[in-house]
Image: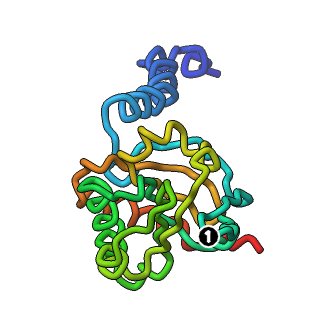
Amino acid sequence: MDLSNKTKPKKNSWLVPWIVLTICVLPVIASTALYSFWKPDGFVNNGELIGPVPIYDLEVSTSQGEMFSFAALNGFWSFVSIDTSGCDDICEKKLYLMRQIRLTQGAEKDRLERLHFALGDNLLPKTIIDEHEGTQFISLLDASELAVFGNLEDATNYIYLVDQIGNLMMRFPVTIDPSLMKKDVRKLLKISKAWKKIN
């Protein structure tokens, strides 16, 4: 009986370990390269991520002697603006952006609330309130009650976003390109549609 076929080494058998190694290592190299050098547009945010900082149980005292609770916004995404009761050009621009970005969300716009905290006991001009109907204007005497938003002097330069379960999670500089802000908000509303509302 001829055993030569059983003992003869197979041609190119030395390639097998290299092929196996390449198959195992290539996905790792590819994923590392993608993570380092390629950021898919759908996963890049334009706003600045924060925390998140839970504020669903935060309550503040208004100038009218009432209490405002963020718990009332449960189930909604909310824009938050903080400024002095004088409301200068930057303040008006924030109110405008909150209104317009909300409108651009189409059918999803009803999932967005707008809050503006005015620091001081002076009421905002009626013309501003009328122009931004639907925004909740809240006057505060004690600015420290909003310390969770950080340095309040710096906070006047941003629009903040609170998610639908009460987490302060993003802020947009007032200088942002509105189209980029719109993009972030649309993306967040889309991916959060399946989130369960907390009662």
Above or below, 39 against 163 in this view is above
**Image quadrant occupied by the C terminus:** bottom right
Above or below, 86 against 53 in this view is below
Identify the residue at the far front of this view: 122
Q: Residues within 10 Å of mark 1 (few under 14, many from 20)?
A: few
Answer with the quarter of the image where residue 7 lies. top right
Residue at mark 1 = 64
User: At which x and y percent is residue 49?
Assistant: 48, 43
**Image quadrant occupied by the N terminus:** top right
Residue 18 in sight: yes
Q: State the residue in front, 102 or 22.
A: 102
Which secondary structure, mark 1? loop
User: At which x and y percent is residue 38?
Assistant: 31, 37
Q: Is residue 68 left or right of residue 82?
A: right
User: At which x and y percent is residue 149?
Assistant: 55, 45
Residue depicted at x 49% and y 67%: 115
Answer with the quarter of the image where residue 31 lies. top left
Identify the residue at the far right of this view: 199
Residue depicted at x 47% and y 14%: 14
Above or below, 35 against 56 in this view is above
Q: Is residue 173 left or right of residue 79?
A: left
Q: State the residue in front, 9 or 33.
A: 33
Q: State the residue in front, 8 or 144.
A: 144
Residue depicted at x 40% and y 85%: 107
Q: How many marks?
A: 1
User: At which x and y percent is residue 83?
Assistant: 42, 53
Q: Is residue 172 left or right of residue 58?
A: left
User: What amino acid type should be assigned to the residue bearing mark 1?
Assistant: Gln
Above or below, 51 against 37 in this view is below
